[in-house]
Amino acid sequence: MIKLTDLLFEMLDEKKADRCKRIADRRYSKPSAYKSGAIVRCRQGKIWKDIKSEAFFIGEDDPEIESKDIQYTKPNFEYEWEEAIRYPEFKEMGKEKWSSLGNKGYIINYSDIEDLLGNVDLDFDSLEDDKKSRFKKSYKSGSIEYPIAVKFNNNTYDLIAGNTRLAGLVELGIDPKIWIIDLSHLNEAKKETLRTWFKRKGAPGKTGGWVDCNTCRKDPKTGKLVCKPCGRQKGEKRAKYPSCRPTPSQCKQPGKGKKWGKTK
């Protein structure tokens, strides 16, 4: 015999499921894997938890943020140069050409490259408080600067700048727009891509790759600087967003500002 409480819980679950689908239908104009994923996350209580009509909350203690049509602004390529020079292709071409190439970029939706985009941390709650505050302020104003990603080929993209903006918008159930700088035509002419160059340097052992300078410590036995690989393993948490260099010795070189870590 079915209990009345079981029926009530079943009705509540159906109501929640319908609610999540209605919200997703408003946010996404056509069926997609991103839309389906958002519905699942909603039903799990990870997004759209406290929506009242079109109101969003980011965390229980944060002020209400009204949903609105976002106006994206063009990236500041001169400011983002310090992020760009982490990539040898951009460092080699120089600031002026980087800016010129950036201005020729194009815009796509995050959902179009979601499974192809590297260097992304979507755990919004774990990001730095000042960055989250700047994102909330920008969102409330209705103006967000495009995150920037580089396209190496049809299957490989990397986020260069704007991780907090990207994570914040995804947290709100929005499919962000990303400014793409296309390097595929350059990499096709080279035998060695950024990926192969990246993997042959850095961390000791089988892992290889660049190192995260925020994790460097002196080995008490050898006195050498030892750092974790730049790329985090699935589910791995780190206190700071990775600041990557090819080798531990290069972590001694000054980066952006006085401290390691992305500033945006």
Image (cartoon, rainbow, N blue to C red):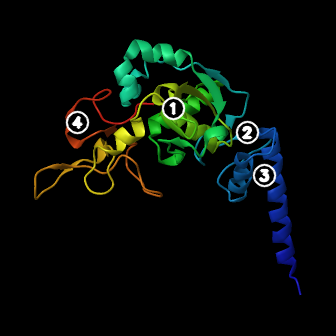
| Circle 3: element type | helix
| Residue 8 drawn at (x, y percent) | 85, 71
Q: Which residue lies most toward the bottom here?
A: 1
Q: Nearer the viewer, mark 3 or mark 2?
A: 3
Q: Earlier in the sequence, mark 3 or mark 4?
A: 3
Q: CB under 8 Å between callouts 1 and 3?
A: no
Q: Is residue 63 something that shows in the picture?
A: no
223 or 153, which is in the foreground? 153
| Residue 255 drawn at (x, y percent) | 29, 29
| Residue 194 drawn at (x, y percent) | 40, 36
Q: Which mark is residue 55?
A: 2
Q: Earlier in the sequence, mark 1 or mark 2?
A: 2
Q: Which mark is residue 250?
A: 4
Q: Rate crowding at label 2 as few (under 14), some (14 to 19) or many (20 or more) other CA atoms within 10 Å.
A: few
- In space, the residues marked 1 and 2 are separated at their CA atoms by 24 Å
Q: CB under 8 Å between callouts 1 and 2?
A: no
Residue 44: image quadrant is bottom right
